[in-house]
Image (spheres, rainbow, N blue to C red):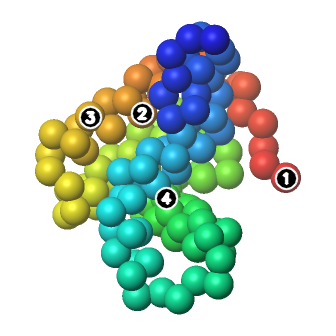
Amino acid sequence: MGEKIYGVDLEGKITPLAVRDAIIVCFKEAHREVLDMTDEFAKWDSPAECEKFRKMEIEAIVKGAFEEARADFANPRREDLIKAIDSLAKLALQFRNRDIVEKHYGEIKRLIDRMEGEDDVQPEK
């Protein structure tokens, strides 16, 4: 197993769905501090409930970026992924400094550049 970016092995087959999922992981990691602040105001019954909320929150943000970009979240193509990360980068610049945003953007762009052909997309069920 080789180098990984947000759980995606660079030596393995990289599909559009794997890149989309990596975007979710990336955004969750990048916005951990914002989510931690939310936790200060919430009364979670368990760590599992907290984690479930975090996952839902980040997925909603990422799905919203896909929608804003008129990109297909369920069956993303290369151009959908690029439009979505462009949208997410604009959002992230409101919370993070440019260097951090560019670093994360570059990592996801690297996955997109190494992605297998779009014919490999398997629709979600």
Question: Disc 1 designates what residue?
Answer: 125
Question: Disc 3 designates what residue?
Answer: 103
Does dot 3 land on a helix, a strand or a loop? Answer: helix
Query: Upstream in the sequence, badge 1 or badge 3?
Result: 3
Q: Is residue 22 above or below residue 54?
A: above
- Badge 3 amino acid: Lys
Q: Nearer the viewer, residue 111 or 25?
A: 25
Query: Upstream in the sequence, badge 4 or badge 3?
Result: 4
Residue 48, picture quadrant: bottom right
Closer mark to the observer between disc 1 and disc 3? 3
Question: Disc 2 designates what residue?
Answer: 108
- Badge 2 amino acid: Ile
Does dot 1 land on a helix, a strand or a loop? Answer: loop
Label 1 vs label 3: CA separation? 32 Å
Q: Nearer the viewer, residue 97 or 112?
A: 97
Q: Is residue 69 visible?
A: no
Does dot 2 land on a helix, a strand or a loop? Answer: helix
Question: Disc 4 designates what residue?
Answer: 62
